[in-house]
Amino acid sequence: MRNPYDVLGVNKGASAAEIKSAFRKLAKKHHPDANKNDPKAAARFSEVNAANEIIGDEEKRKQFDRGEIDAEGKPRFQGFPGGGAGGPGGFSRSSRDGFETFTFRTGGAGPQGGHGGGAFDDILSSMFGGAARARGGGAETFEYEPGPSAMPDLDLNASLGITLEDAVHGAEKRVRLPTGKELNVKIPAGITSGQTIRLRGQGQEIAGHRPGDALITVTIAQHPLFKVDGNDLRAELPVTLYEAVLGAKVRVPTLDGAVELSIPKNTSSGRTFRLRGKGMPVKGKDPGDLFVTVRIALPDGNDADLEALMQRWRETKPYNPRSGM
């Protein structure tokens, strides 16, 4: 993979905000959904996401700048101070069957007539957190199988936007991974924004390693009527002036269908009513509530009769709702 700074088109001294802005611009430009007739869009989109995974993460960016990881996020082997490939104390490496093989030229037998293999075994084991073993020959060759700390990160991260109805009732959605691969994802009822769904074995694959997982972070889109407040929902209910003054029964939308709400006489704008159990579902508990706030809506345009009524009201029955302020 290319240098992530080059992929996102930013310099090495770019701020986190500049990197985030560049990533968003390129991700929108190369998103496969916006380039359905371009077969190479998915590859460019994946490269942009991979670059952001490195320099968009503060810790990984520092590791990359120090040369500890490469452009794909894999750890670099730094070698030993003063060592060099091909000379005394130097090394070369190759990879086969999921093992890394390092050949060290020790420059001859040690004080005990051996090659010092045990010492190098200890060094490699401590460095790589895995099992190291020596093979004889003109040079000491050590093979190790990386332990947990040296395992590459093969997980893939993606985001998925869903509706509030999907979150409440559950759904099945299709998501596109940074690699361009598409998967069906089952959304459990009651999921909240920011939760992550793990799809095991659907991440990246490298020979000799267990496949990574796909981590799907769910975001609930803003609803045109309801606002999520923890396990509760909040909504505003417009009513007419005469409904507020005379009282009425009005239909109120909920996520389970409309219900009837009784508005008492002389209801002021801003009064809130609670509809129990009409909020978000909670696993193992009672669902949240729906809080409905009344807003008095006047008719559009000028109404001469209404204005005349209000003028008579102002003259004969004045009152000040702000007297306590």
Image: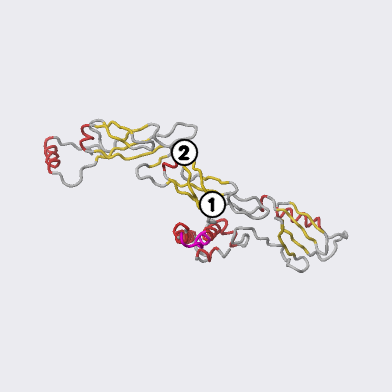
Q: Which amino acid does label 1 sit on?
A: Asn
Residue drawn at the location 53% of the way across and 64% of the way down: 5
Indicate yes or no whether the magenta region holds residue 50.
no
- SS of the residue at dot 1? strand
The reply to whether callout 1 and callout 2 are in contact (CB within 8 Å) is no
The answer to whether 130 is drawn above or below residue 141 in the figure is: above
Position in image of residue 177 (x %, y %): 52, 53
Q: Nearer the viewer, residue 85 or 154?
A: 154
Identify the residue under disc 1: 157
**Residue that protrudes farthest toward the front in the picture:** 37
Kindly identify which numbered label has been placed on residue 197: none
Q: Distance between the residues labelled 1 and 2?
A: 22 Å
Q: In which quarter of the image is residue 120?
A: bottom right
Identify the residue under disc 2: 190
Label 1 environment density (alpha carbons within 10 Å; few <14, some 14–19, many ≥20): some
- SS of the residue at dot 2? loop
Q: What residue type is labelled 2?
A: Gly
Considering the image in quadrants, where does the C terminus appear?
top left
Q: Quadrant of residue 47?
A: bottom right
From the viewer's perspective, tell me whether residue 259 is left or right of residue 266: right
**Residue that protrudes farthest toward the bottom in the picture:** 87
Q: In which quarter of the image is residue 317?
A: top left
Q: Give the range drawn in magenta.
A: 36-45
Position in image of residue 66 (x %, y %): 61, 62
Considering the image in quadrants, where does the N terminus appear?
bottom right
Whichever of callouts 1 and 2 sits on the residue coming sooner in the sequence is 1
